[in-house]
C-alpha cells in the first residue's frame, strides 16, 4: 500500500489552526489560562518517515500546575544506531517489548486534545508526529504550536545565554529537572523553561497565547516597539489610518475587524518593505467604525483620494482616470482628456491610464473612419490631406472630400451609439479585420487588433454598467447581517449617501427612515460617474449584485441597454484569455 507523502515544514509552516478548531478563541486566552502539553521525543535520528520514534514524554500543565504525564518507550521497528544509544542510554533490549508507534498514537492524541503543543525545536518533534499520523492513518489534530527555542531567541539576549540549547536554558532558569536526552526528563525541563520564558514575556506586553506565538516568530524590532499602536482598537468593520507624528495620514486601510487587521501589521506575516518603513514613521492609529464593510470600503477610497497617503498604492488614486471623447467641432476626432465637460456628449471611459485609452482609440480608428490628425478643421477652407487619406483609412475631411453630415453619419454617430447602446458595428469591423489578418498569416497584427477590441469592449461595458447605476436618483438595498439584522445602504446617483445596520429581530424600516433623514444630498451631474469615483460606484455595484443583497426601493428602473456591451461578455473573456502578441 502506498504511504502518504510527508514533507517537513519550517517553524513558519507549523499549523496556525485553532485548538480543537477554535483558533480565535484559543489565541485570546491568557497564558495563565492556557493548557499546554509539553512534548519531547527521542528518535533513531534521520528524517521523519513515519517511524524512528523510540520514546515519547509529555507533560500537561496549566497555570503552573501539572495536570498529567504521559511517558512510554516506543519500538521503532528498526535497529537503534550505536551513537543514539550512547547519547540517550536507550538500548535495543529496552525497546524490544515496547509498543509500536501506531499503538501509542491514540493515547497521545487523546492526551493532546484541546491543548497547545509545546516543544523545544518544535518543527523536529512535530515533523515526526505528523509523519507517524500520516503513515498509520490518524488525522493530525492541528494544534497550536509554541516553540520554546524560537521564543528564547526573542526573549533572551546573547549576554544572558550563549545559545538556545535546552541544556543551556535549563541551567539559566535553574530547572528542577535537568535534561538527560530522555523524553520525560527533557519534557519536564522544557516545562520549567516555558514558565521562565512566560515570566519574561510580561515585560514585552505579551499576555495571550496568540501574542506569544506571534512574538516567537521573526518580527522586526520596529514591529515589537510599535505593537502598542494596535491596542484599544474596536473589533468592528471600518477604516484604520496610520498617522505620523504631525498627524499626516501615512496609510489607510479597511477591514471587517479593525483590531485584528491592525494587529497583523506587527506580526511575522507582514513582510512588505514599504509597510516596515511606514510602521517606523507611524505614531498613532485612528479607527473609523462603519456600519458594514461596504461603508468601510467607500470611506477608504474617499480618504485615499482626499489625503493621498504615501504608502497606499498609487493605482487607487481617482485623479489618474482619463476619458476618450469626441471633440466639439464640425469634423470631430477622438481626444484623451482628464475630465468631461457638460457639453461633451460622445465619450468613453473612465480608463485607468492614458495607454489603455489610446489602445481603445486605436480600436475605434480600426473600425470607424474617424480622422486621427489633431488640426482644427474649417468648413470654409481646406488643407492638404495626410498619408492616411491616401491609404484609404481617412475620408479626408481636411480636403472636404466628405460633408459634415456624411462624416457624422459614418464616423461620429456610430461611436456615440456604440458607447451608450449597441457596439455591434465596432465589434463586427474589428472581428473582420482580425479574420483578414489571420487569413494572411499576420498573426501578431491580428493579436494587436484583438487587444484593441478587448480594451474597447472592457471600457464600453464598464461605462454602461456605471451609467445604469448613476442614473438612478435613489436606490435602497439591504443585506442580511451575520447577527441576524440587516445591513442597509442608500445610494444616490452612484454615491453612497447613507449606511446603517438594523438590530436583529427588529423590523429594519425605523433604521432605514433614520439614515434616510440624515443621508447626504446628491445632485445629478454629467457623465457615468458624476458624483463619486468610478471605484466607489463599482464597489457599490459589486455589493448590490451579490445574490444575498435585496433591492428595497428605487426611484427609477435599474437597467442596461438590451443590445448593450454586456452581451459581448463571453467574447471579451475569450479575448482576454488569449495569449498576447
Image (tube, rainbow, N blue to C red):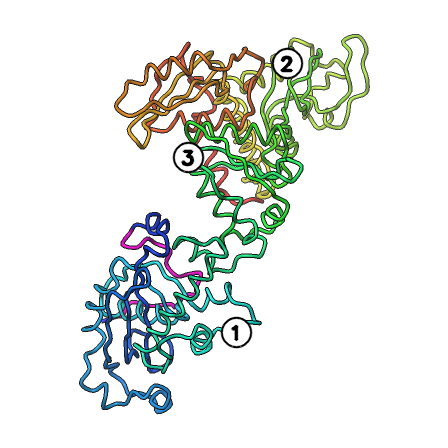
In front of the other: 70 or 21: 70
Q: Residues within 10 Å of mark 3 (few under 14, many from 20)?
A: some
In front of the other: 337 or 191: 191
Q: Residues within 10 Å of mark 2 (few under 14, many from 20)?
A: some
| Left or right: 319, with 102 as reference point | right
Earlier along the polypeptide chain: callout 3 or callout 2? Answer: 3
Q: Where is residue 231 shown, x and y percent of the image?
A: 48, 43
Q: Which residue in the structure is indicated by mark 2?
A: 344
Magenta-drawn stretch contains 19: yes
In front of the other: 142 or 473: 142
In front of the other: 102 or 276: 276
Earlier along the polypeptide chain: callout 3 or callout 1? Answer: 1
Q: Is residue 153 above or below residue 534?
A: below
Earlier along the polypeptide chain: callout 1 or callout 2? Answer: 1
Classify residue 304 by image quadrant: top right
Q: Is residue 119 above or below residue 398?
A: below
Q: Which residue in the structure is indicated by mark 3?
A: 236
What's the distance in space between the residues labelled 3 and 1, CA to CA? 43 Å
Amino acid at each position: 500500500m502506498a504511504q502518504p507523502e510527508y514533507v517537513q515544514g519550517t517553524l513558519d509552516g507549523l499549523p496556525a489552526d485553532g485548538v480543537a478548531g477554535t483558533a480565535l478563541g484559543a489565541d485570546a486566552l491568557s497564558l495563565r489560562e492556557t493548557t499546554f502539553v509539553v512534548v519531547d521525543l527521542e528518535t533513531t535520528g534521520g528524517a521523519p518517515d513515519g517511524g524512528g520514534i523510540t520514546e515519547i514524554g509529555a507533560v500537561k500543565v496549566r497555570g503552573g500546575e501539572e495536570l498529567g504525564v504521559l511517558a512510554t518507550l516506543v519500538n521503532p521497528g528498526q535497529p537503534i544506531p550505536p551513537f543514539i544509544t550512547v547519547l540517550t542510554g536507550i538500548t535495543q533490549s529496552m525497546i524490544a517489548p515496547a509498543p509500536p508507534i501506531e499503538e501509542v498514537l491514540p493515547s497521545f492524541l487523546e492526551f493532546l486534545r484541546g491543548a497547545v503543543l509545546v516543544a523545544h525545536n518544535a518543527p523536529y518533534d512535530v515533523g515526526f508526529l505528523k509523519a507517524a499520523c500520516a503513515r498509520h492513518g490518524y488525522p493530525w489534530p492541528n494544534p497550536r504550536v509554541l516553540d520554546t527555542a524560537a521564543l528564547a531567541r526573542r526573549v533572551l539576549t546573547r549576554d544572558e545565554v550563549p545559545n538556545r540549547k535546552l541544556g543551556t536554558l535549563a541551567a539559566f532558569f535553574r530547572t528542577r529537572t535537568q535534561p538527560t536526552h530522555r523524553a520525560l526528563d527533557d519534557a519536564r525541563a522544557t516545562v520549567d523553561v516555558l514558565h521562565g520564558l512566560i515570566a519574561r514575556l510580561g515585560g514585552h506586553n505579551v499576555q495571550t497565547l496568540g501574542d506569544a506565538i506571534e512574538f516567537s516568530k521573526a518580527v522586526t524590532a520596529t514591529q515589537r516597539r510599535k505593537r502598542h499602536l494596535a491596542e484599544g482598537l474596536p473589533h468592528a468593520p471600518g477604516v484604520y489610518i496610520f498617522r505620523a507624528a504631525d498627524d499626516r495620514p501615512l496609510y489607510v486601510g479597511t477591514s471587517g475587524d479593525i483590531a485584528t487587521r491592525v494587529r497583523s501589521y506587527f506580526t511575522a506575516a507582514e513582510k512588505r518593505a514599504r509597510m516596515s518603513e511606514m510602521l517606523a514613521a507611524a505614531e498613532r492609529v485612528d479607527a473609523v467604525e462603519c456600519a458594514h464593510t461596504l461603508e468601510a470600503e467607500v470611506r477608504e477610497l474617499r480618504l485615499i483620494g482626499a489625503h493621498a497617503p504615501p504608502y497606499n498604492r498609487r493605482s487607487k488614486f481617482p485623479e489618474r482616470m482619463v476619458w476618450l471623447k469626441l471633440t466639439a467641432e464640425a469634423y470631430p476626432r477622438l481626444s484623451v482628456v482628464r475630465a468631461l465637460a457638460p457639453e461633451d456628449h460622445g465619450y468613453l471611459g473612465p480608463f485607468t491610464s492614458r495607454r489603455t485609452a489610446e489602445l481603445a482609440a486605436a480600436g475605434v480608428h480600426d473600425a470607424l473612419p474617424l480622422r486621427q490628425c489633431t488640426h482644427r478643421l474649417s468648413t470654409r477652407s481646406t488643407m492638404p490631406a495626410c498619408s492616411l487619406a491616401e491609404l484609404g483609412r481617412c475620408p479626408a475631411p481636411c480636403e472636404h472630400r466628405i460633408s459634415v453630415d456624411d462624416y457624422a453619419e459614418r464616423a461620429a454617430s456610430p461611436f456615440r451609439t456604440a458607447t451608450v447602446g449597441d457596439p455591434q458595428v465596432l465589434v463586427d469591423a474589428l472581428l473582420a479585420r482580425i479574420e483578414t489578418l489571420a487569413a494572411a498569416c499576420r498573426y501578431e497584427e491580428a493579436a494587436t487588433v484583438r487587444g484593441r477590441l478587448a480594451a474597447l469592449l472592457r471600457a464600453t461595458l464598464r461605462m454602461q454598467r456605471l451609467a445604469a447605476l448613476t442614473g438612478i436618483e435613489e436606490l435602497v438595498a439591504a443585506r442580511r447581517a451575520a447577527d441576524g439584522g440587516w445591513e442597509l445602504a442608500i445610494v444616490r446617483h452612484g454615491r453612497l449617501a447613507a449606511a446603517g445596520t438594523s438590530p436583529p429581530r427588529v423590523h429594519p424600516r425605523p433604521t432605514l427612515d433614520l439614515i434616510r433623514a440624515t443621508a447626504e444630498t446628491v445632485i445629478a451631474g454629467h457623465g457615468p460617474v458624476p458624483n463619486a469615483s468610478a471605484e466607489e460606484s463599482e464597489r457599490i455595484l459589486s455589493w448590490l449584485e451579490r445574490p444575498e443583497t435585496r433591492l428595497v426601493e428605487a426611484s427609477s428602473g435599474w437597467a442596461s441597454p438590451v443590445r448593450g456591451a454586456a452581451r459581448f461578455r463571453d467574447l471579451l473573456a475569450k479575448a482576454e484569455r488569449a495569449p498576447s502578441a
